[in-house]
Amino acid sequence: MFARKLEFDLMLIKKDEFLRKLRDEVLPILKKQAGFIDILGLTDEVKVEKMLLISLWETKEHAQRYEKEAFQKISALLKPYLLTPIVVIPCVVETTISEHILATA
């Protein structure tokens, strides 16, 4: 399993609109991508404008194909809500400690 971690600062005044956009427009795009498993949204408890989106993929190749084919469109959809550019960090998921995710995928 593979993950893409996106880090950025969110305009707090537009947080509800951002989450609606994520649910109504971004998630359907992700669900159409081969190998997509799930997405997690996390906000910092102290610096509430800091946000992480972690997308989970069956393989690195699936994540790379998504990067080439759909990420620019999603990035453009999210840009109006962001204070900072999106920083993308690719990650290998240690499946030995997350077996329950594989069982539900």
Image (tube, helix red, strand yellow):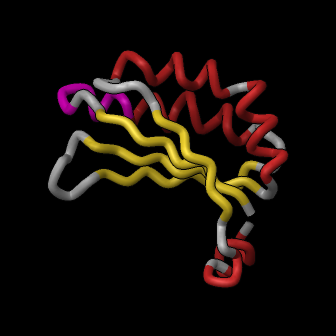
Horizontal arrangement in the rendering, residue 81 relative to residue 74 (left or right):
left
Can you say which quadrant of the picture contains the C terminus? bottom right
Where 102 sits versus 34, above or below? Answer: below
**Residue 48: image location, x then y, percent:** 20, 46
Q: Is residue 13 magenta?
A: yes
Residue 62 part of the magenta-drawn span = no
The N terminus: image quadrant: bottom right
Task: Please tell me which residue is depicted at 65% across the width and 35% down the height of the picture.
Answer: 28
1 relative position to 38: left or right: right
* Range drawn in magenta: 12-18
> Which picture quadrant has residue 97?
bottom right
Q: Main secondary structure of the magenta part?
A: helix
Q: Is residue 90 above or below residue 104?
A: above
Residue 104: x and y, percent? 70, 72
Q: Quadrant of residue 74?
A: top right
User: Residue 80: where, in percent of width, then height?
Assistant: 37, 16
The percent coordinates of residue 11 (x first, y second) are 24, 28
In screen coordinates, is 41 left or right of 25?
left
* Numbered circles on residues, count: 0
